[in-house]
Amino acid sequence: MIRVPFAGHTPIHPRWSEHHRPTSTGLQTARCQITRTTAGGATDANNVWHPAAPATVYTGPCRVGSAPTASPAIMGDRQVSTTVHTVAIEWDAAEVLEGDIVTLLEASVPGLAGRRFRVTNARYASEGWERILACTDDLTRREV
């Protein structure tokens, strides 16, 4: 026999996400920093413009996953290869925007620390244990 909730009731507890967030955060074993370039900057005595230092949006635990293969594409007269990563951060982190830069500060996987990704999409949902960011990594050009 299948039981259904009474009218006006939900089978999901109202604090379902809140209950599972500590487990999700516990799985975030890497550490990252997310920065945003601002519109500021200044011109020096030689009339050379210098952009403002990026503002830090988030520093804390994260979890990184990646697509199984890179995607080659032709841009202009060059072939470039990018791969998509998902970066999970704490659910209550400050807003992350498209174009922000994720820098991995610490990771247990060799070669992952120091990598930089560009955020392409910050995903949101009505139930959330963590904030999921879709990011790209340009394998052709290592700097972001």
Image (tube, helix red, strand yellow):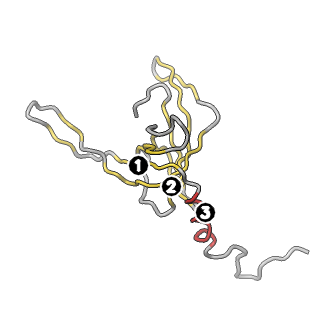
Q: Are marks 3 and 2 in contact (CB under 8 Å)?
A: no
Residue 101 locus on image (x, y percent): 41, 43
Amino acid type assigned to the residue bearing label 3 in the image:
Thr
Q: Is residue 46 left or right of residue 62?
A: left
Q: Comparing marks 3 and 2, which lies closer to the viewer?
A: 3
Q: Which residue is mark 3?
A: 23
Q: Which residue is mark 1?
A: 34
Mark 2 falls on what kind of element? Answer: strand
Location of the N terminus by quadrant is bottom right
Name the residue: 69% across, 73% down. Answer: 12
Residue 90 locus on image (x, y percent): 50, 59
Q: Are marks 1 and 2 in contact (CB under 8 Å)?
A: yes
Q: Is residue 41 left or right of residue 10?
A: left
Q: Is residue 110 left or right of residue 9?
A: left
Q: Report the Cα–Cα distance between label 3 and label 2.
A: 13 Å
Q: Is residue 47 shown above or below 79?
A: below
Judge by depth and name the residue closer to the eye, 62 or 16. 62
Location of the C terminus by quadrant is top left
Amino acid type assigned to the residue bearing label 1 in the image:
Ile
Q: Residues within 10 Å of mark 3 (few under 14, many from 20)?
A: few
Q: Report the Cα–Cα distance between label 1 and label 2.
A: 10 Å
Q: Is residue 21 shown above or below 137?
A: below
Q: Earlier in the sequence, mark 3 or mark 1?
A: 3
Q: Which residue is mark 2?
A: 89
Name the residue: 53% across, 31% down. Answer: 82
Q: Comparing marks 3 and 1, which lies closer to the viewer?
A: 3
Amino acid type assigned to the residue bearing label 2 in the image:
Ile
Residue 63 locus on image (x, y percent): 55, 50
Judge by depth and name the residue closer to the eye, 126 or 67. 67
